[in-house]
Image (cartoon, rainbow, N blue to C red):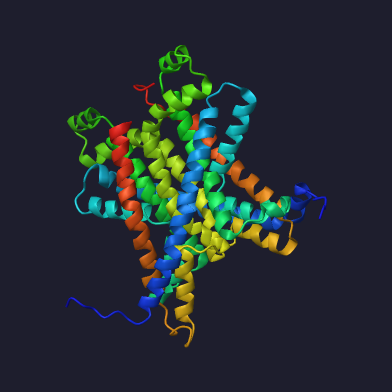
Amino acid sequence: MLFVTLPDWVEPTARYMFEVGLPGTLRIAAFSLVASAVVGVVLGTLLTIRFLPSRALIRLYVEVWRGLPIIVTIFIVFFVFPVAGHQFEFDPFTSATIGLSLWGSAQIAEATRGAVQSIPREQHEASAALGFGWVGRHVFVILPQAFRRLLPPVVSLLVGIIQNTTLASVIGASELLTTGKQQVERITSPPPAGIGEIHAIEIYGAVMVVFFLISFPLTRLAIFLERRLV
Amino acid sequence: MAVAVLFEPVEFVRENFDVLLAGLGRTLGVAAIAIVGAFFIGAVLGAARAHRVPVVSQLAAVYVEVIRNTPILVQIFMLFFALPQVGITLTPFTVAWLSIMVWGGAFNIENFRAGFEAVPYRYREAALALGFGRVKAFLNVTLPIGGRIALPSSINTYIAVLKNTALLYVISYPELTKTAYDINSSTLQTLETFFVLGVVYLALVWTLSALIRLLESHLALPENA
């Protein structure tokens, strides 16, 4: 049989999860990835400078945000930041993005440090001899070469960020798992809102499948890049 | 509104000491069960992967890919909120250790597989030549050497397992994060609560990381040193 008629609850549920939930997940992931990459590359490059105070500060940043469970980081952004003042009060979506970016940038900073330090000293010396200053040397000579080594960990981090967007559900930001949870609860409730049936396995199963379909090709890509580039 | 924010973490810990300690105890307890479980899953299925044991190896590969490519939070939801649909109701405690053990086990399979595969073939050859059977050769040669190679990366997995216990907040299992969250809800001492929570996690994670660095130099194989 080719056409299996789906139960009535499936269509509106799937529509809501794909039109509201999935874009939320992708938006949090995209913003977090860009912020993590920018902040991480800058901090990681600065970490290679032999100036103790700046190194100690960046080290602290990296070790703190790498060390904390991400859910705790998100709680800190969401609940503790507002204590510092109104301008630090963020909605759930932004809080989750900031929390993930703090974690992601710490990961990228560490990877960048390793990648930059793996570039031979001659490259620094040659570009200095050509008249580049510290910034020009890094922007035009060192970092472009370091990016090769940086790519596999960045792809792995992307998988991590995408999976961890689900943590946004604990503070109520709208993403795939949040919408799935809402739909499970709605369908469980008696008519007219729901149908009084439990369909948690189907819905959470679908969430798992979606994440798998996004993550699996990316983990393969990370392994492939690791073999090719490093 | 310019209100001077009072910040008294020591006083805070003193007032909530028993509750926090109980939460920390549950975090460590659940993590300990999961870490021991993940060790055995990793060692057994990692060996099956490395030695290409038919069927078991393929099943382990599927297990690894499914767990690694789906969010652990959804896995926890599956166990706790979805399984009752088919009549399987697990207690929060069971879901707590089971979910993070299954997760850690999957990552550990890869750690151990890589460790076992890194054992030079001539060691196994020598063991077989000395009359060891396949199982004995594994237990006496591949396991101790490969386990040593896999140790740093598997400790990294155990650290992640410990950090993942914080996710058990979502099933209201009263581990450290849930405990702190509840204290915050009732006392509104937000700054103190999350400061103490963060310090405790960092103390645990940083200690384990330092342990890796210590072990790495200590356990390095003589050949590679």
Residue B87 appears in the figure: no
Residue at the limit of the structure toward the front, as seen here? A131
Residue at the limit of the structure toward the top, as seen here? A129
Residue B10, position as x, y percentages in the image: 76, 47
Instruction: Give the image quarter of residue A64.
Output: top right
Closer to the camera, B120 or A99?
A99
Closer to the camera, A70 or B94?
A70
Image position of B98 (left or right of B5)? left
Image position of A4 (left or right of B14)? left
Residue B133, position as x, y percentages in the image: 20, 39
Residue A8's place in the image compared with A175, above or below, is below
Q: How many marks?
A: 0
Residue A204, position as x, y percentages in the image: 40, 67
Residue B5 appears in the figure: yes
Residue B97's place in the image compared with B155, above or below, is below
Image quadrant in which the C terminus of chain A is located: top left
Image quadrant in which the N terminus of chain A is located: bottom left
Residue at the limit of the structure toward the bottom, as seen here? A191
Closer to the camera, B6 or B64?
B6
Tell me the residue at 35%/55% (across/down).
A214
Residue B114, position as x, y percentages in the image: 31, 38
